[in-house]
Amino acid sequence: MSEFIVQIDGVEVTAPEGTTVLEAAKKAGVTIPTLCHHEILEPYGGCRLCTVEAEVRGRTKLVAACLYPVEKDLIVRTRSEKVDRIRKMILELLLAHAPDARDLQELASEYGADKNRFGKEPSFCIHCGLCVRYCAEIKKKNAISFVAMGPSREISFIPEIAAKECWDCKECFPLCPTEALQAAFVLTKEMAFPSPSLEPAPAE
Amino acid sequence: MPRINSAAELETLREGILAKKVPDKPCISICAGIACLGLGNGKVISAFEDELKKQSLEDKVELRATGCHGFCEKGPLVVIYPEEICYVEVKPEDVPEIVAKTVVDKQVIDRLVYTDPATGSKAALQSEIPFYKNQMRLLIGNSPKINPQSIEDYLAIGGYAALAKALFEMSPEEVLQEIKTANLRGRGGGGFPAGSKWETARNAPGEPKYVIVNAHEGEPGAFMDRALFTGNPHLVLEGLIIGAYTIGSSQGFIYTRHDTPVLRKNLDLALEQAREYGFLGKNIMGSGFDFDIEVHLDVGIFVSGESSALMRSIEGKAPEPRPKYIRTSVSGIWDKPSNLNNVETWANVPQIINNGSAWYSSIGTERSKGTKLISLSGNIVNSGVVEIPMGTSLREIIFDFGGGIPNGKKLKAIHFGGPMGGSIPESLIDTPLDFDALSKLGASLGAGDMLVLDEDTCMVEIARFFLEFLSGESCGKCVPCREGIRQMLGILTRMTAGKGKEGDLELLEEISEVVGEAALCSLGRSVQKPLLSMFKYFRDEFEAHIKEKKCPAQYCKGLS
Amino acid sequence: MNNERIDHILDEHQGNPGALIQVMMEIQEENHWLPREVMVKISEKLDVPLSRVLRIATFYKTFSLTPKGRHKIHVCTGTACQVRGAQQVLNEVQELTGIKPGETDPDLKFSLETVNCQGCCSLGPMVEIDGETHGKTSPAEIADALKKYE
């Protein structure tokens, strides 16, 4: 297993093959903002907030730090005019859905994102996928999933599974940056769960 | 069924097939391509079958349902050999007369031949029709002459000779060198040198290696791959087997659409026959080389034409693209080296091996060699599949082959590459058909689909339409594509309804730039392209929609 | 709904999660839609989470989660057809049937869908009804054609 010496914002750090730029940056003491990333889950690459400039032998490209593997002669810039512009736009696009989400507020002010840039969108899920991935990878219950595609894509609890599993679990609830998850659960419970006699009684 | 076990046996079989042919035996070749079938050519084929039976001519006259002839606008098409008399817009009622007058009496039926709408002059022979004249039909020219369901028809025109040459007279390195010297560039949209790609897969560590035919053709307006593949499946198979030999692959995949039954049928038959004759399977032609092919069907989604998504689909997973940090030539299907090329790219390989790279590179321009299949569609008189050498000017394609714009309208723009491509305005139509010349203008050749737009087209509406298409095809995983397209579509829809605001164009430019830079896959990253090219050449149209609430093409309802 | 055929397809691929998409496509082709109970069966027989079946079923336009009408109308909205006037044809079909793409009318007579480029652009605008192609059509022509369907 080879090791590479890479540069993150001018700081040199050694990382074994297979390390992502995000992990290498952490080693170098550099924080890259993320929304869909979580230590215990597989990297997702969905929010693109961790976009950084990756330069190898004179050629620069924009990559997602949570996925991009370190390589020989890699020079990474985690902030630049281009990177900042991209992050600002991503935040503004997400703020159209969840203008008051706590995880977005600090990032918004750091990058100068205007929560009123775009008209308000009806759904406040930002599709970080943490709930879906947690239930699939950690709990292995698949009680919640993405349905439909493109701009119509949404999270959805599967009533048949959720009615059995979620009552005693709800471990995904704190992961949600916007509380769209809790709202989806309540909605599914009220409207689609099988009849009450099948619901386990809450613990005393 | 004879199994070929050497190059000599192939030639003996070929000679046998040719010897059995009756010279000058009349042959009725009917185009059974998608468009002609849609126009009811199935009934014409049955009518011919019935009439030949009625006249007891089944043994004396050959009837052949072929792949696309190319002149789709004038279908149903029938060509009578050996004279090559071409009849257009044939109906079942015309059949008895055609059999009696042309096939038997060798007379031309005037009302059925092509008439030039501009000059009124008629052309009885296929080679005299302006659409066909001056084309260089190296790939598709054989389609009217063979039955795609008969491997012996393919052998009769020299099929599999290139494979024999590669396997017995050349080493894999020598084949690779020929492909590199010929400078065959990918015909699927990338224009990337095929030889380089093959070399990367060949040298990449890992076994087994895979070769793939991308026969997905999801781009709206592109139909030349299906036309070629349905009409001459063995041509593509031969190219694939040669490629597999060069790269060192023993397993190939053909990825195609689930909604084209004729292509599927012809493909299954071609594979079955190729295996029977020893061109596929173990110990191909007695050379010791093993290779076989599996066919995989798509689910009906545009993104599955993207190479990494396609490979996920072959693995049995949902076709979600993967970021291209690791090239698929190095790590593709099941993380093994996988070489993917388009149908037309593979189809070019046998002729390069047969005639040599020097011959191939004598056709075309300095950096774009060979011929290109073009699907001409939209506001054009002669819609269909055209094959011309690289370097032909766009003006020639539109006016000489395409017959110009219908209804006396003026040409406004030519759009290449569909929702991920760009437009060339009328003022630049002397540009040659060339990968780099077109790229420089912001409208890369793409797969070769040319959409012709006349003066009544509203470019704002076209931009909106493309974005609507991409919105329906976006997987929705990443923020830039999902949210970016959402907002851009909203802005353009408002613009076409007369509600555009100052600053909309700048906002569109800003959003599309971020989407282009930060999206996960090439679908998202190409969203920018049509918009950018339209802003470059047609910005005034967009501004008229915003500032004056006017649609210069008078297309958008609600605007003056 | 032909339960026997559906069970047969499922038995063939029992316990093989990798065959999910293929199985769903076969059932869609056979039954023209995927009822909820069938999706639950697929989940059980193929040993895949129900959420994945639902995800695939809602992801691809190829699958339908509602029953289809007796007559299926497909209007091509590829770029070339669009440029030759497909939008006007689609508007006429919507007017006459009272439904929008993706919908079926309450009497289960017509189902309407827009389809991506079918590859016969010279026939644009193109509408397919029950597999029969109506090429180079116009709003008036398609109105006429629709009258013939019960």
Image (tube, helix red, strand yellow):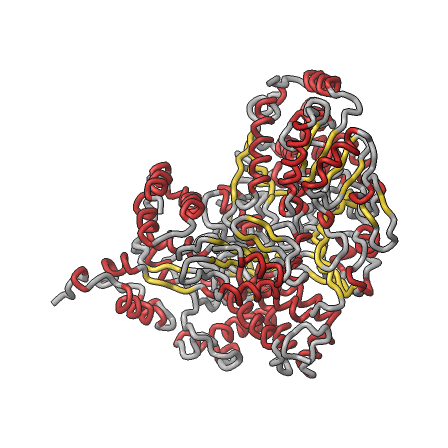
Q: Nearer the viewer, residue B67 or A155?
A: B67
Residue at image x 73%, y 32%?
Answer: B28
Q: Nearer the viewer, residue B55 or A83?
A: B55
> Residue A99's image quarter?
bottom left
Q: Is residue B118 left or right of residue A124?
A: right
Could you tell me residue A31's position as x and y percent? 47, 68
In the image, residue A186 sits, relative to residue B93, either above or below, namely: below
Q: Kindly give the residue lying farthest to the left in the view shown.
A: A204
In the image, residue B535 sits, relative to residue A45, either above or below, namely: below
Work out whether residue B337 can be spotted: yes
Could you tell me residue C8's position as x and y percent? 35, 38
Q: Is residue C148 left or right of residue B466?
A: left
In the image, residue B125 sits, relative to residue B476, either above or below, namely: above
Could you tell me residue B104's position as x and y percent? 78, 29
Name the image quarter holding the C terminus of chain B.
bottom right
> Residue A186's image quarter?
bottom left
Name the image quarter holding the N terminus of chain B.
top right
Work out whether residue A70 can be spotted: no
Residue at image x 72%, y 40%?
Answer: B94
Q: How many marks?
A: 0
Residue at image x 83%, y 51%?
Answer: B116
Q: Nearer the viewer, residue B471 or B407?
A: B407
